[in-house]
Amino acid sequence: MPGKTLTRRGLLKTVGLAGAGAGAAVFGPWKHNRVYAAASDKPLKIGITSDASGQYANSGASDRRGMMMAIEEFNAKGGVLGRKVETIHLDTETTPATGSRVAERLITRDEVSFLIGAVSSGVANAISQVAQKYGTVYLNTNSSSPTESGKNCHRVKFVWDGNGTNFAKAAVRNAMKTYGDNWLLLTNDYVWGHNTSAATRKLVDAEGGKIMDEIMVPQGTRDFSAILLKVQQAKPQVVAAAVGGDDQKAMRQQVAQLGMGQSPAWINNQQDWPDVYGLPLDNLFGVFGTTWYYKLDLPGVKDFVARYRAAYPDTRMRVPGNVFYNGYMATRELLSAVERAGSTDNIKVIKELETLKVSAEARMQHHDGFMNPATHQMQQTIYLATANPEPAEKDDMFKILSSSSPEEIKDQGAEGACKLESYDETPSYEA
């Protein structure tokens, strides 16, 4: 009831310390020569909920590297409000049920102040339900189903990636003009795939196009021969693929092997860097969306890439991609919001994030970014890209074709579907 909010401390006492099983890993080690302000000896603990196994393990690792670079940078300056930032990571296994258990454990047993991380939208939704129960601020860094900032939104959750509607708006109209009206949908059979394909279908219908068929791709698919035979038999002008993670890598390799990369035309709503890094250029057929690229000719980009290389000299991915970028940006803005609030009070931090505005220069994008207070989704530039036929270096795999402003690709449907809990309905705490 309004005015009678149960504090998170009270909730923790009610539920006890039950949670997920063992397996927590504290990131570090922290350098002994760092000096932190004496405001508090208690570290600020963040629970990392990104995938370390399953379909999105590679993206989860990249997501964590982005978070950790931002945290290391704050700690090198003395921490946040004089407190060292520490992290605890538990693997969500790209499984919603595990995501729920992990979130419960991190909040009730490990008593983290905030949760960060997700690639799978189903997992992110599960985590956010637990987070809302306790009032724990949760940053969904890299999952992009439109439902994450729509019907599954929560007061405590903030979504940092572009969503399926944003990417579809950037790609569909131009693709119909260029390639044709007859489309086929390839859809990963889970929440992100379903809702991304639904957004594409709606836009194709609105432009007078035809969806000839929709083929579901079970998660974990490695043999695409039967699926690609159906595509050949249907003879669409455009295939719109909402297939992610290791599934997409396998699909791209087999499409290229069959010589299907040029005809029909392929639209991949969103292309995550870890899914394609190191693949031959003929695997990068079609047009795809992204939020950032390491070769953007913008202020700050070269320095950001240099800091990544210095922080992770041994990682296989020699340059940062969009998943790393989202993890870094989300973490940086969370810690900055805590500093502006002058407190870890969750309601104060939520209000700081809801009014967040970030210049194009600070985001290393072409347009200013801002948090939509009605949906808690970061509004940002969306880029369309394709394979780079003349790479300047080995890692220069993308050619950026266009950029769209937040206003051009806004998801009005999410605003209508999102019903955020009130502040009074959200348990309060100060860690």
Image (spheres, grey):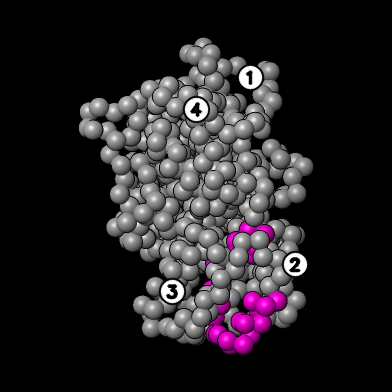
In the rendered image, which residue does mark 2 sit on? Answer: 280
**Cα separation between marks 3 and 4:** 42 Å
Q: Percent x, y for residue 90?
A: 61, 37
Q: In the picture, which quadrant includes the C terminus? A: top left
Residue 277: name its quadrant: bottom right
Q: Nearer the viewer, mark 3 or mark 4?
A: 4
In the rendered image, which residue does mark 4 sit on? Answer: 108
Q: Nearer the viewer, residue 199 or 123?
A: 123
In the rendered image, which residue does mark 3 sit on? Answer: 201
Residue 23 in view, yes or no: yes
Amino acid found under the numbered disc labelled 4: Thr
**Cα separation between marks 1 and 3:** 53 Å
Q: Nearer the viewer, mark 2 or mark 3?
A: 3
Q: Earlier in the sequence, mark 4 or mark 1?
A: 1
In the rendered image, which residue does mark 1 sit on? Answer: 34
From which residue to which does the magenta span run? 225-248
The residue at the far left in this view is 2
Crowd band around label 2 with a 10 angstrom C-alpha radius: few (<14), some (14–19), many (20+) = few
Q: In the picture, which quadrant includes the N terminus? A: top left
Q: Work out whether 403 lies above or below 142.
A: below
Q: Secondary structure at mark 3?
A: helix
Q: Secondary structure at mark 2?
A: loop
Amino acid found under the numbered disc labelled 2: Pro
